[in-house]
Image (cartoon, rainbow, N blue to C red):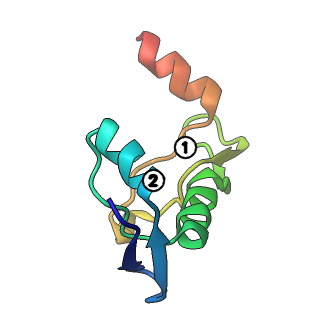
Amino acid sequence: MPDKELTCRDCGKTFTFTEGEQEFYASKDLSDPQRCKDCRANRKAERRQLHDAVCAKCGNDCQVPFKPRSEEEGGKPVLCRECFMASKDE
């Protein structure tokens, strides 16, 4: 299996999908990557970013792993970790 040249869907740059990477992806039954390593790393870092919010139940400041949206934007009430865990036990 020779190396493949792929185009990143985010930045549009060409990147090399090596023979070894192809074998690994095939062994895990994964499709070819659509993003270069830099764009994959950036996307992963964005998913880990925490955003400031105010708990809708207790009113305490908290951080959540998604960007809260207002009700006008179709968002739902945000709960801090403690209130979220307590609501799961109810």
Where 47 sits versus 78, above or below?
Answer: below
Closer to the camera in the image, 46 or 71: 46
Q: 77 or 19: which is nearer to us?
A: 19
Residue found at x 53% / y 17%: 86
Disc ID at residue 39: none
Marker disc for residue 56: 1
Residue in the image at 54% along x and 20% along y: 85
Q: Nearer the viewer, residue 20 or 9?
A: 20
Residue 59 sits in quarter:
top right
Q: Which amino acid does label 2 sit on?
A: Glu
Residue with the mark numbered 2: 21
- The Cα–Cα distance between marks 2 and 1, rounded to whole angstroms, is 45 Å
The three-letter code of the residue at mark 1 reads: Ala
User: Which quadrant is home to the C terminus?
Assistant: top left
The reply to whether dot 2 and dot 1 touch (C-beta < 8 Å) is no
Q: Who comes first in sequence, dot 2 or dot 1?
A: 2
Residue placed furthest toward the top: 89
